[in-house]
Amino acid sequence: MKKTRWIAAAATTATLIAMSGCSSNTGSSTTTSSSNAAAPTLSGDCAQFQAYAGHSGSTVTMFGSILSPESDSLATSWADFEKCTGITIQYTGSNTFESDLPVKVNGGNAPGLAIIPQPGLLAQMVATGTVKDPPAQTVTNEGNWNDAWKSYGSVDGKFYAAPMSSNMKSLVWYSPKYFAANGYTVPTTWADMMTLSAKMATNMTGVAKPWCGGIGSGTATGWPATDWLEEAVLGTYGGQVYDDWISHKVTFSDPKIQAAMKTVADWMLNPAWVNGGYGNVQTVATTTFQDAGLPILKNECGMLQQASFYEAQWPKGTDVSENGDVFAFKLPAVDPSISNPVEGGGEFVTAFADDPATQAVQNYLSSPEWADSRIAVAPGWVSANEKVDQTLYTDPIDKISAKYLADPTATFRFDASDAMPAAVGSGTFWKGMVDWFGGKSAADVAKEIDASWPTS
């Protein structure tokens, strides 16, 4: 999101206040760490929210990087919870979230909850001493994810933030109709993908190119290019080198990472292949990631490497299917000896308040019931919660994502820049990618990122 989810150009505030539609009677109730002993008994469709009752009239503020249109489904996903409990969730999204959150926290204006897409930023916030321990029910609910996700929501071995979503990064978007019309087949190896790219370049004319891309994203500009490098590192060397790179045991100047940058340069900095629909390679730096793939619909771009959540960017009415206007295939490994490399991202619900209403929301958002609700209203959204109802995934991209994210044979790793220290991952790494696509050498970019690495 992440950087994973800057889904629109302007911030949105979604506040749903609804109190009708469920009946209640004063009486005993099931209580949790965030419920009130005097909570009313909920009945009918609202009975499912009994554990969260007792805080009617409370407002819980939430801040994140999720913007419209994705934030619209976010608000819809908890509308019944609000209606039945009387708790209002006041969500605000910003495309400058990564820089805004520290300002809010350090200025004493922290939100009740924040949806943090970077483990590195989570660690930065925990260091301020303002992050609250999760309630007992959230800790219990966390057991519905595998241990890797708990580690991403932990700092120095202590669990702070439950995962909220997961997304599949290792996808390539394309037009099945365009492929069929030109006799192209979906590549299953990196070599095949490079051969296809060269063939497309020969056949295309004008502004059309095999690949399109954009790395613009407000103050998060640069993150799509970090994904390209991360895919190259993971797909070339596997998990151990990738992990050592995150911890800086392997530096950006290391020959392995420099070789991976060469792989990316031959691919996404190739003037014969990029930037379909927009112009030369340099336009990648000035094109927003939201707009990057739209030339696919005009047959001006053959392919776009972007995460599963990019589905929200296709215009209304776009047929996203195996034989439709757009679809996606799994990005192949650079080295075929690497077992099914899969890069993923996600978001973590982090608390800066521990009042009962905030904890009730925190508990609900960590539950499989909320995940089911979000899946039902948000195509392109996948949960890492192992207890979600898999039949709710009706969207074909969601099915692909869930398949690979849950594959026990996959070489799965979390987005590297999100896992690096925030000063690097959402700082010099992002900036370095912008500089690189602007013409600076890979070696110079690497030196600057390495020099910025925190000493402790």
Image (spheres, rainbow, N blue to C red):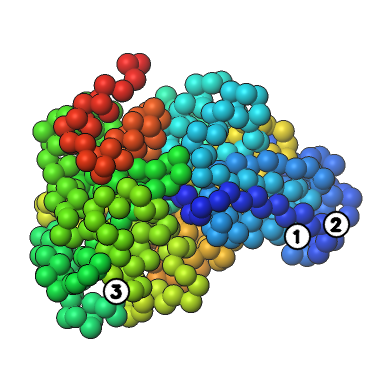
Question: In this picture, is 333 found above or below 419?
Answer: below
- Comparing marks 1 and 3, which lies closer to the viewer? 3
- Give the SS element for disc 2: strand
Q: Please give the label number shown on residue 72.
A: none
Query: Is 228 placed above or below 320 here?
Result: above
229 up-or-down from 308: above or below: above
Q: CA distance from mark 3 to mark 2?
A: 56 Å
Q: Amino acid at mark 2?
A: Ser
Q: Marks 2 and 1: CB-CB under 8 Å?
A: yes
Q: What amino acid type should be assigned to the residue bearing mark 3?
A: Asn
Q: Is residue 146 visible?
A: no
Query: Does residue 337 appear in the picture of this structure?
Result: yes
Measuring from the top left, give residue 327's x and y in whole percent. 34, 71
Q: Secondary structure at mark 1?
A: helix
Residue at the far top in the pictured view: 456
Q: Amino acid at mark 1?
A: Cys
Q: Which mark is residue 46?
A: 1
Q: State the residue position of label 2.
A: 24
Q: Nearer the viewer, mark 3 or mark 2?
A: 3
The residue most toward the bottom is: 181
Residue depicted at 25% across the width and 67% down the height: 207
CA–CA distance between discs 2 and 1? 9 Å
On the rendered structure, is 143 left or right of 76?
left
Q: Residue at x 12, y 55 (%)?
A: 336
Q: Using a 10 Å C-alpha cutoff, classify the residue at mark 1 as few (fewer than 14 neighbours), some (14 to 19) or many (20 or more).
A: some
State left or right for residue 266 relative to residue 386. left
Of the image marks 1 and 3, the number of the one nearer the N terminus = 1
